[in-house]
Image (spheres, grey):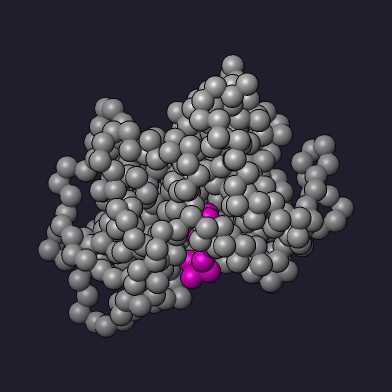
C-alpha cells in the first residue's frame, strides 16, 4: 500500500522511462551470461554510436532551456564546502602522486578559477579550477579532467592537479552537481537525490554532471593551449562513475581512468550485492521505501530508484554495454578486489567486451583492469601511480 505521494510514485513510468523501455526493445546489443557470469556463446554486438545517441536523448529529456556556452570569471575558494563531518583536511594518497621536483614551482604554477554556463538555472553554472605551468613556448599540451568523490569538491583534488601540472599537463577539476560551490548546505546533494525521486525532473546521480562534462569538452577543445586530441579524464568513486559515463557519452575524452567507480548495477540487483552502493546514498532509498509502502529496502525498491533518478542505469546503459562502447580508446579500470560497492564479479562481462573491442581494433593493450588485492572501496597510492603511468603512456608525445 502506498503511504504518501501516491500520484508521483504511481507515475514512475514517465515519458523518460517509456523512452528507455522502447530503446531496450530495439537495442542491438545481445549479451547474456551463464551461471558463472561469463560471456555467452554469442558475442556482444554493441552499436556504440547508436547507444551513445540514445543516452544523449535521455539526458536531453530533463534539461532546462539551453543557453550559449560562455565563461565567467571566478575566484579561488578559501573555505570549500564539504558535505561530511569531520571536514577532510589532507589526503596522503593524493599527495603520493608522481610529480616533478621544480624548485620554483610556486612561481611557475598558474591557477584559473571560472564558471561555464552549461544550461539555464543555478545548477547550470559549472565551477572550474585549472592548474598548469607557465610556459614560454606555444606548444599545445595534454589535459586531464579530475572528478571528486561524493560530498567533496574540486578543491580536494589540488594535490593531484599540482602533481600533474608539474609534469606538463593542464589539470582541470570541476564541482559536480550539488557539490562544492553548487551546494548551499550540508545536505544539498542528498536533498537533490530525494527531489529527483519525488519529481523525476532532474538526474543528480551521474547523468546531470555528465551533461556538464560534455559542455566542458566543448570548452577544452577550443583552448589554444590544449591539444584537443589528448584530453584524459579520471575520478574517484562518484567521480569514477562520472569519468566512465562522460567518456562513453563523449569520444573527445581520449584516455580514461575510472577509480573505484565501475560496477554492474543490474548484476548487483540480480546477485543481491546492491546494499553497499545503496548505503552510500541511503536517504533516497529510504524515501522510496516509505513511498512504496515497504518495510525494508529490497531489490524492487533499488530497481525503481535507479529507473527514476538515472533511467537505463541498471539496464541498457549499464557497464556490460557502456564500458565496451568506450573501447578501443585507452581505458584503465582501477578497483579494489574486496570493494562491496563495485563487486569485481559483476565486471566479467564488461571486461570481456572491452578486451574484445580492443582486440578487434588491433590495439589489445588499450584496455586493462586492475583489482588490487585486499582493498575495499578506497583509492590507494598504487592506483594513483597506475593512473599516472597510464596517462603518461597514452597522452605524452
Q: How many marks?
A: 0
**Magenta span covers which residues?**
242-254
Q: Nearer the viewer, residue 152 or 177?
A: 177
- Up-down: is 214 above or below 196? below
Residue 248 lies in magenta, yes or no? yes
Q: Position of residue 345 (x, y in %)?
A: 68, 38
Q: Residue at x 55, y 35 (%)?
A: 7
- Dominant SS of magenta comes to helix
Q: Residue at x 80, y 48 (%)?
A: 32
Q: Quadrant of the N terminus?
A: top right
Q: Name the quadrant containing residue 11.
A: top right
Q: Residue at x 34, y 45 (%)?
A: 178
Q: Nearer the viewer, residue 122 or 354?
A: 122
Whether residue 334 is visible to the viewer of this picture, yes or no, is: no
Whether residue 23 is visible to the viewer of this picture, yes or no, is: yes
Q: Name the quadrant containing residue 304.
A: top right
Q: Quadrant of the C terminus?
A: bottom left
Q: Is residue 62 left or right of residue 88?
A: right
Q: Name the quadrant containing residue 269.
A: top right
Q: Position of residue 204 (x, y in %)?
A: 44, 46
Q: Residue at x 51, y 30 (%)?
A: 5
**Which residue is farthest bottom?**
138
Q: Nearer the viewer, residue 304 or 142?
A: 304
Q: Position of residue 284 (x, y in %)?
A: 48, 32
Q: Is residue 42 left or right of residue 233?
A: right
**Which residue is farthest front?**
7
**Which residue is farthest right?**
41
Residue 233 lies in magenta, yes or no? no
Q: Is residue 72 left or right of residue 170?
A: left
Amino acid at each position: 500500500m502506498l503511504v504518501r505521494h501516491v500520484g508521483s510514485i504511481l507515475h514512475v513510468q514517465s515519458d523518460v522511462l517509456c523512452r528507455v523501455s522502447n530503446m531496450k526493445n530495439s537495442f542491438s546489443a545481445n549479451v547474456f551470461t551463464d551461471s558463472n557470469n561469463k560471456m555467452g556463446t554469442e558475442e556482444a554486438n554493441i552499436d556504440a554510436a547508436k547507444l551513445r545517441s540514445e543516452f544523449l536523448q535521455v539526458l536531453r529529456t530533463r534539461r532546462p532551456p539551453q543557453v550559449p556556452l560562455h565563461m565567467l570569471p571566478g575566484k579561488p575558494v578559501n573555505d570549500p564546502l564539504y558535505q561530511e563531518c569531520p571536514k577532510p583536511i589532507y589526503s596522503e594518497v593524493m599527495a603520493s602522486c608522481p610529480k616533478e621536483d621544480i624548485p620554483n614551482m610556486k612561481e611557475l604554477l598558474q591557477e584559473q578559477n571560472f564558471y561555464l554556463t552549461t544550461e539555464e538555472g543555478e545548477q547550470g553554472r559549472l565551477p572550474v579550477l585549472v592548474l598548469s605551468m607557465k610556459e614560454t613556448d606555444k606548444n599545445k599540451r595534454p589535459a586531464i579532467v579530475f572528478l571528486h568523490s561524493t560530498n567533496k569538491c574540486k578543491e580536494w583534488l589540488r594535490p593531484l592537479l599540482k602533481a600533474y601540472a608539474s609534469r606538463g599537463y593542464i589539470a582541470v577539476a570541476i564541482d559536480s552537481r550539488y557539490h562544492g560551490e553548487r551546494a548551499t548546505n550540508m545536505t544539498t546533494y542528498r536533498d537533490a537525490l530525494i527531489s529527483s525521486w519525488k519529481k523525476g525532473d532532474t538526474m543528480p546521480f551521474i547523468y546531470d554532471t555528465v551533461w556538464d562534462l560534455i559542455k566542458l569538452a566543448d570548452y577544452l577543445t577550443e583552448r589554444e593551449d590544449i591539444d584537443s586530441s589528448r584530453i584524459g579524464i579520471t575520478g574517484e568513486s562518484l567521480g569514477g562513475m562520472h569519468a566512465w559515463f562522460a567518456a562513453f557519452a563523449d569520444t573527445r575524452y581520449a584516455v580514461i581512468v575510472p577509480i573505484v567507480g565501475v560496477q554492474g548495477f543490474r548484476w548487483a540487483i540480480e546477485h543481491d550485492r546492491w546494499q553497499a552502493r545503496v548505503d552510500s546514498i541511503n536517504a533516497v532509498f529510504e524515501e522510496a521505501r516509505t513511498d512504496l509502502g515497504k518495510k525494508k529496502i529490497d531489490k524492487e525498491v533499488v530497481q525503481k530508484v535507479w529507473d527514476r533518478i538515472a533511467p537505463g542505469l541498471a539496464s541498457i546503459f549499464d557497464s556490460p554495454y557502456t564500458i565496451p562502447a568506450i573501447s578501443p580508446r585507452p581505458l584503465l579500470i582501477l578497483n579494489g578486489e574486496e570493494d562491496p560497492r563495485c563487486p569485481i564479479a559483476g565486471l566479467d562481462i564488461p571486461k570481456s567486451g572491452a578486451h574484445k573491442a580492443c582486440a578487434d581494433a588491433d590495439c589489445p593493450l588499450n584496455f586493462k583492469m586492475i583489482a588490487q588485492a585486499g582493498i575495499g572501496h578506497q583509492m590507494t597510492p598504487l592506483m594513483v601511480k597506475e593512473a599516472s603511468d597510464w596517462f603518461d603512456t597514452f597522452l605524452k608525445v
